[in-house]
Amino acid sequence: MYSINKIKNNNRDDSSGRNSFTLSLMAILSALVFLSTPTPLKASWNNPYSTTSVESADEMVLYSSFSGRPKHLDPVRSYSSNEYAFIGQIYEPPLQYHYLKRPYQLEPLSAVEMPKVKYVDSAGVELAGPVVSSADIAYSIYEINVRSDIQYQPHPAFISEQRSMDSESLARVEQLIDFSEQGSRYLTAADYVYQIKRLAHPSLHSPIYGIMTEHIEGLAELRTELKSTVSTNNSEWLDLRNFNASGVELVDKYTYRVKIKGKYPQFLYWLAMPFFAPMPWEADQFYAQSELKDNSITLDWYPVGTGPFMLTVNNPNRKMVLERNPNYHRDYYPVEGEDGDSAAGLLEDAGREIPFLERIEFSLEKESIPYWSKFLQGYYDSSGISSDSFDQAVKFSSAGDAELSDEMRKQGMRLQTSISTSISYMGFNMADEVVGGASERARKLRQALSIAVDYEEYISIFANGRGIPAQSPIPAGIFGHTSGKDGINSTVYSWKDGKAERRSIAEAKQLLVEAGYPEGRSSETGKPLTLYFDVTGSGPDDRARMDWYRKQFEKIDLQMVVRNTDYNRFQDKMRSGSAQIYLWGWNADYPDPENFLFLLYGPNAKMDGGGENASNYSNPKFDLLFDQMKNMENSLERQQIINQMIILLQADSPWLWGFHPKNFGLYHSWYKNSKPNLMANNTMKYVKIDPIMRSELRNNWNRPMFLPLLLVALFFILLIVPAWLGYRRKERSSLRLR
């Protein structure tokens, strides 16, 4: 009886186990069915943004990134591209660059019109007439009339009680939003005057103070006075309204003047930089409170401007957010551009009020690979192209043109390229007894090397094709640049079949013979010619580049010795003129030919005067033409003078002209109104996003791949079920035997 009951109980247990297993199996299968069914929810499971930051279907939000906190957001101190990505959207100087037109063209921004310029002699008498000699001009006076309809963004600095709070109240403030009130006021000309005076403030260390003292009358004297006051005044705030600068004059509420020494037309370009954006004295006083500075509540952390956006989140460990300024004045998308802009869809929003974006979110991304992955998933709206991802994104046609890869094309990407306003070059020290000087021997040696060093090959190998060989110092997009047959360096290239073709190695060797170095040996001594190449790089990529340069020299039987030093030692060698051949580069401060041609102006020699003429090149004819050209307005006459200067440079060959880097950018199909503008900093106000298209494509690209999980689960089910059934049969058999 006992045995029978035991068997019955065990049968009940077996039935219960089967039921339990059946239920478990059904649950697993139900889960697998659910996981294999696409839903909108699962498409966002890999969204890197928090649910609170995910935009609504019609909200204009742009997603970008930053790799490290910008050091300065105070416009008097900022001078780097990662800082300008933010402050260019926040501050508004008097002028800006036209978003679409090339060559780059200035236009009013916060100014009513382009500044009026008056020239006066040393006695202050205005120089009139159609032609005024630069030699007669003692001062140029720029009069700027600013708009009366511009307001500052909401900010606690405009509440008087919050500019002078007691220590106890300030101790409770940890971030700007802790202040109970925010105010605003209208912009005045005095705010621009105040900012110019800040350039001279000894505690701010503006990077352009030295340059501006050469041009703005009285700025150096103001600096001396401020230094003296700071040393004797214990006050935390130095009210610059109480100090005068002879070169800065407030005319009326909306007009001010800047007095420039001599003639310096390039000053207009400076008026498009944030250095000359307005600064309200209230903000200066507000941030001078020591308790705020102790908590890093400063202009470098919380800027205050009149621009289209304002910084609302500054978390350098995670993200930074720009939001639309609710007080932004009326501003409109350009109604005209250059040829091709209309066909490219860049004028579809002509005349519409801007900005289009409501918010710009910058997420911290220290590595390029995670950024690239998120970009491909649609979580970033645009991207540069690193060397790691270049082959995935770009291919070159048989004609050598860059095109999108098939993968990128399928995703609807758009590739845009632009020639950088910069140059990378190899220079000769013209003070060197071998490669320098104006002798025919040295000139033909430099010309031979200019032909031999194949920068087309360099660009292909080391720059992924992202560059064009330079024919002169002036890149495309800058006045003075000449393209096509008329613009080639005839010393190095010939024009064949509608394009520039590098001259042959045979021609380079013939120049060496004429220079007195047949087969790379001195015709006088028979010794091989050895040249010295001074560089600072020491990594694997740098060694590969040096090997390449060495091979270029060997093509014409010349020996090249690399002299690798640290940067400080290299700088010393450049200043002392002990380098022979070197690598250098230049990024334009402003889009004027003077900003490139001055790199070869004799009085700017690095060895004698510490200037930017690193080659110590000196040609009296070139210097005379430069003096004529530098202060001219853009005109046919100026272009003709520039052409003469370029011909001299090409013949003298103080540089191997190197290349102008080419920028590559990828944009998703929902990113509208994109046109690279390498001089403008305030371009985000023109950008538009199609958020509905973005949302749809994101969902399509990011549907979870559950099939592999389904297959794995089925595999385990098929593995487990037979084992379990076998185990139960064995157990029942064992019980029956009892």
Image (cartoon, rainbow, N blue to C red):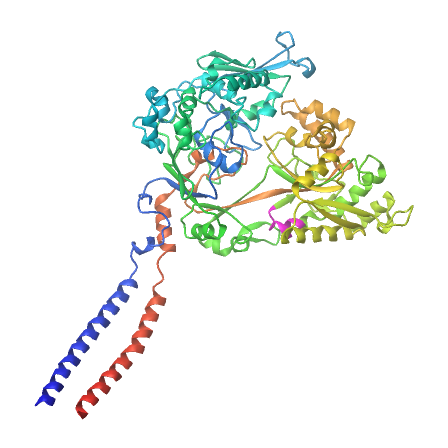
In this view, 209 is above or below 388: above
Residue at coordinates 65% horizontally, 22% vertically from top-left? 632
In this view, 697 is above or below 684: below
| Relative side of 338 to 177, left or right | right
Q: Position of residue 62 (x, y in %)?
A: 40, 41
Q: Which residues are magenta?
A: 458-466
Residue 199 lies in the magenta stretch = no
Question: Camera-side residue: 428 or 679?
Answer: 428
Residue 188 found in image quarter: top left
| Relative side of 213 to 355, left or right | right
Q: Position of residue 350 (x, y in %)?
A: 43, 32
Q: Position of residue 306 (x, y in %)?
A: 41, 26
In this view, 107 is above or below 587: above
Question: Camera-side residue: 591 or 73?
Answer: 73
Residue at coordinates 70% horizontally, 15% vertically from top-left? 135
Residue 7 found in image quarter: bottom left
Q: Position of residue 446 (x, y in %)?
A: 78, 42
Quarter of the figure that contains the N terminus? bottom left
Residue at coordinates 65% horizontally, 47% vertically from top-left? 537
Residue 463 lies in the magenta stretch = yes
